[in-house]
Amino acid sequence: MSRVGKQKINIPAGTTVKIENGAISVTGSQGTLSRFFRPEIKISIEGNIISLTPVTDNIFTRKLWGSYASHLKNMIKGVNEPFSKKLIIEGIGFKAEVTGGNLVLNLGFSHPVYVSIPKELKVTTEKGTITITGADKELVGEFASRIRALKEPEPYKGKGIRYSDEVIRRKAGKKAAAAA
């Protein structure tokens, strides 16, 4: 039994949830999100409460039960207050700027790196930080990880792109190794 799936999900005021042919659309002040859900989990709306129940009891549906409940909670939360991720750029000459629909990154390569921004996301840059906001938690996290993968932080000087809450374990360089 899924502890997450058993919980009832409350729909806040100003948010509407509709089920049409296995697709659920959630509309709120920040926009609309929709997602297709498999028929193995029955999703029912009664008033302002959503409940999920598995149609059959097997390993696959038990896995889906909690996942679908989490997806619905994230969709409802995202259309009311957007999710955000902050990335920090560290390194001499490393910078980022938004031009048009692209994020332009100078990361020490011989050329600037252009990354197209999905239309569902809002990306802002300040000195040394990139802020990614959007209603879809999955899309925000995926885009942030794609940006981070362009220049992962290295352990000797800490140069690269990292999450704001990420801690980089620093290693000692040659001098410390030679002294031992």
Image (spheres, rainbow, N blue to C red):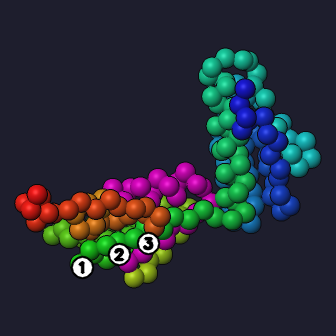
For label 3, count other residues whose C-alpha is less than 10 Å away and answer few (under 14), some (14-19) or many (20+): many
Residue at the extreme bottom of the image, as rendered:
127
For label 1, count other residues whose C-alpha is less than 10 Å away and answer few (under 14), some (14-19) or many (20+): few
How far across and down, in percent of the image, does residue 41 sit?
73, 28
How far across and down, in percent of the image, does residue 77 sit?
70, 57
Dividing the picture into quadrants, the one containing residue 4 is top right
* Closer to the camera in the image, 166 or 134: 166
For label 2, count other residues whose C-alpha is less than 10 Å away and answer few (under 14), some (14-19) or many (20+): many
Q: Secondary structure at mark 2?
A: strand
Name the residue that disc number 3 marks. 130
What residue is at 43 percent from the left and 61 percent from the top? 166
Amino acid type at image mark 1: Gly
How far across and down, in percent of the image, does residue 146 sit?
38, 56
Whether 130 is among the magenta residues is yes
Whether 70 is among the magenta residues is no
Distance, label 1 to label 2, CA atoms, is 10 Å
Q: Secondary structure at mark 1?
A: loop
Q: Are marks 2 and 3 in contact (CB under 8 Å)?
A: yes
Amino acid type at image mark 2: Ala
Magenta range is 128-151
What residue is at 80 percent from the left and 46 percent from the top? 9
Name the residue that disc number 2 marks. 96
Q: Is residue 134 visible?
A: yes
